[in-house]
Structures are given as C-alpha cells and as structure tokens.
Image (cartoon, rainbow, N blue to C red):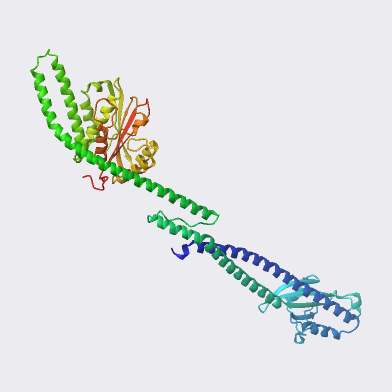
Amino acid sequence: MPVLHSLKVKFVAALILLVGLVIGLSTWWTLEVHRKHMLHATEDKVRALTEAIDRGIHVAMREGRSQDVQRILEEVGRDPDIEKIIIFDTHGKILRASQVDLVGRVLDRDRLSRYLDQADLAVTGLHENGQLVQSVVKKIRNRPECFACHGTGEAVNGILHVDMSFRKTQEQIAEMEGTALWTMLLTAAVLAAGGAILMVRLVERPVGSLIRAMAKVEGGDLETRAGPGQRDELGRLADSFNTMVDRLKAARAEIEAFHHQRLARAERLATLGELAASLAHEVKNPLAGIAGAIQVMADELPEADPKREIMREILEQVHRLDKTVRDLLAFARPGKPDIGPCDIHQVLDRVLILLAENPAAKQVRVVRAYQPGVPSLDADSKQLGQVFLNLLLNAIQAMPTGGSVTIATRLVRNGDRQSVVASTGQFGGTERSDRRDQLTNRLMYQSTSPSDGRWVEVTLTDTGPGIPPHLLQDIFNPFFTTKHRGSGLGLSVSRRIVEDHGGWIEAESSPGQGATFRVWLPVGAVTHRTGEPLA
C-alpha cells in the first residue's frame, strides 16, 4: 500500500495540521499582544522623555541658563534609541538640536504648518530610512515667566520635536517571533512523533495483525485467529472477527458433512438406479407380452362373461406396472435434452389439449395468465411438456370435486428471481429450516445463471387442499407419494428435467389454500450444473 494512503500518515498529517493551526493562531495572537504592549511602552517612554526635556528647558530658561538648553539636548540625544531632538521657532528655523549640524536649518512650510496645527502634544509614527520612528511634537507655550525675554506678542515660543527609533523594539519582537516559531516547530515535531508512536502501538499493529489474519482466512486457513487485542473498539473488532471465523468454520464443516452425506446417498441411489434400470428392463418386455396375451384372452370371451371384467382389471394393473417401469427407466437413465427453439406458451397449450380428454380434468377450470412478449427458449419441448403434464395431473388429482388451476408466465431477471426465492424462504420445493440445505441450494442457483440474466417463470397455482408442511420437504424425493396409485417418480423426474435445462423448480403451500409450483427456465445460453453448456 502506498505510504501516502496509510492511516498512520493521514493521522499524523492531520495531527500536525491541527496542532500547527492551533499553536500558530495562539502564537500569532500572543505575539500581536506583546507587540502592541511594546509599542505602547515605547510611546510612553518617548512621551515621558519629551515632558522631561520640556521641564528641563523651562527651568534653565527661567534661571537664565539658556546655554544649558543645548547641553540638555546633546546629553539626551546620546541615547541610542533617540534619532534626533530639535527646537525650532514658529518660522521653522531650528534653534537648538541634539545634532549641532542641524542648527540653523529651516523646515519646509508644509511640515511646519502641520506641526503648528497639531495639539500641544502630538505623538505620530513615521517611517524614516526604512525604520519605524516614534515622533513627538510639543509646543513650548509663552508663559508669564517667559515674558521678560520673549515679550507677550507670541503664544508659542518654539516647538520641541523628539524622534525615537523602534529599532530595539523591532529587534526584540523579531527575536520573540523566532523563539515562538522554533517552539511551535519543536512542539509540532514532538506531537507528530508521539502521535506516530501511539498510532503504531494502538492502531497500526492491531490492524496489521487483523489484516494478516484476514488474508490467511481468505486463503482458506480457518484455524487462524486474531491475537488478543486491547479493551477498545479494535479489540472488540478482533473478537468479532474470531467469532465470525468460528462460525464460518462450523458452517464449512456442516456443508462438507452435508455434501459427504449427499455424495454417499447419490452413490447409493446411482447403484440402486442401475439395479432398478436393469430390473425394469428385464420386466418391461415380459409385461408387454402379458398385456398382449391378456388382451387376446379378453377379446375371446363373450361380452356377457363376468371373467371379461376381471381381464380388464388385470390389464389395467399391467398397464399401471408398465407405466411405473417406464417412469423408473426415465428416472434411472434420463435422456439428454434435444435442445431447440421452444415457445413455452405452445408447450403449455399442447399439454392442456392432452388433458382435455381426461375425465377428471373436466371438473377443473384452467385460467391462462400468459405475459405477452415472453421470449423463446432453447429447450426440449417434449421434456418440458412432460414436466408441466406431471404438475397439472397432480393439481387435477388434488381437486376431485373440482376447482381451478391458474397458469401464469412472465419474464424476470436475476434480481427479481432472487428476491422471490428470498421472500418465500423455500428452495427446491421445501421449507427447509436446515441452514446447510439453504446454503447448498443458493450455490446451485448461482452456478446456473443465463448469460443475459433473464428467466421465464411459469407458475401453476391450484385451489386444492394444499400440501401439509411436514410433507412439503419430501415431495421431490424419488418414490415419495401420498396417493394409492402412482410410482412417486413424477416430481423427481420433473425436477431433473428442469435442472438439466439449467432451471429450477420450487413448491410452496399453506394447508387449505392450495399449492403453487414455480418453474424458472433460463433465456439464452446457459451453463449446466456440471459446468458444461447445454447445447
């Protein structure tokens, strides 16, 4: 798996981003607060310094020591944070300055006008030579004690201008920002390393162990179990995985045992089938001779002879035995389907024509519910006719006093068929509570799917007494019958024919509400249960 797609990388990256965002915002806010405090402190310093210079100048002038004013400015100007200190008159001429070479210079009119229009004490931030400078301008008012030297004509004797550099403050801010950045990076690195270690110990190792166990189970090793985990969600996930593997192992053992039983039974049935086929073949020809002899003897008897009735009864029983032998041969040695184009509606109609002459069928009303546009099948129409003939005869025999049979057809797809099977819970004509049978039959369904996913569904529903639940699971078994007459092979042969066509048959019934038989036949190319194409 690519490293960028691993859960560890995603977790650590998300942790770094989240922590970086939180620390970055908090650091920015802290730095911003400190920067404002430092700027305010510098502003307060230059304001206080300006007031002190003003008081010193006032004292020196009042005591007649005007020469001390220049000395005061030069001494204060030695402070490395002081850019310059000047005193200029209302005409803009510099009278005193911390830098002697500035004395005598004249300010430009715009700057002078701006200074004169300001309040007595104004603090502004200026950028000079690429640096931030705090500039304080204070007007030196003409006080009464100044009248002796300056007269009373002017309200302002001069203007004191002090520029203090923010260089030291900016250096402190930059140092603080660097320290905060390195602290943030170090914190993020420690958290990332810690998060990665925790991710490996708490998530990656348990998940990796679980993935390896799943890979072994996928490979067929059902003895593998996930190691004992912690008491958290991953530990519960490992426990659930182990429980699932235990159930899967038990289910596979049940299926294998079931298949062994079915295989042994199939082998026994195959042996019995061969024996029955041999016996049937040996009995069939003599039965034909017996039937012919009895028919000749019956024809030679007078019409009024009571023995003639006995002969007819014997002949009927011989015909019954002959049908049983033929059914037995059909079951033991089924013929290969003769595949060709087959219209399912025509097959059903031909069967109904054959049944029209049956006396019992005259008491039963047949309802056709054919869906228009049902496509043609690739099937053996004669074998399918035998299937529907058996199903209709069973329905007619179940309603000796009359009733109705509804024959419905429709085109369905794989999803529709699967939903019907899932909703009825019945497979292969049984209401099986045995989970092994359900799994086996679902696998059989999945192995016989038409190439285009379409099926023709034929449903036969009667209004008879229904089939008792305890008998429903056995009706497709060979030789099972509840009638006094019959071989019990009709439904077994029908199921085999349907399955040989890649289809499926099922039955459902509720006591007193009739029975329903559903037959699904595939449309298009179909793979046989053995994996060989039908045609």
Answer with the quarter of the image where residue 129 lies.
bottom right
Q: Which of 87 and 279 is in front in this view?
A: 279
Answer with the quarter of the image where residue 488 lies.
top left
Q: Residue at x 9, y 14 (%)?
A: 302
Classify residue 140 as left or right of residue 337. Answer: right
Q: Is residue 298 above or below residue 93?
A: above
Q: Is residue 249 above or below residue 302?
A: below
Q: Residue at x 85, y 85 (%)?
A: 68
Classify residue 22 as left or right of residue 396. Answer: right
Q: Nearer the viewer, residue 354 or 59?
A: 354
Classify residue 134 as left or right of residue 346. Answer: right
Q: Residue furthest bottom?
A: 101
The spot of residue 66 in percent (x, y) is 87, 84
Q: In this view, does 407 lie above or below 418?
A: above
Answer with the quarter of the image where residue 285 lies.
top left
Report whether residue 419 is seen.
Answer: yes
Q: Quadrant of the N terminus?
A: bottom left
Classify residue 347 as left or right of residue 98. Answer: left
Q: Which of 456 and 103 is in front in this view?
A: 456
The spot of residue 355 in percent (x, y) is 22, 26
The spot of residue 519 in percent (x, y) is 29, 36
Q: Residue at x 48, y 59 (%)?
A: 207
Report whether residue 501 is seen.
Answer: no
Q: Which residue lies furthest to the left in this view?
A: 300
The spot of residue 190 in percent (x, y) is 59, 68
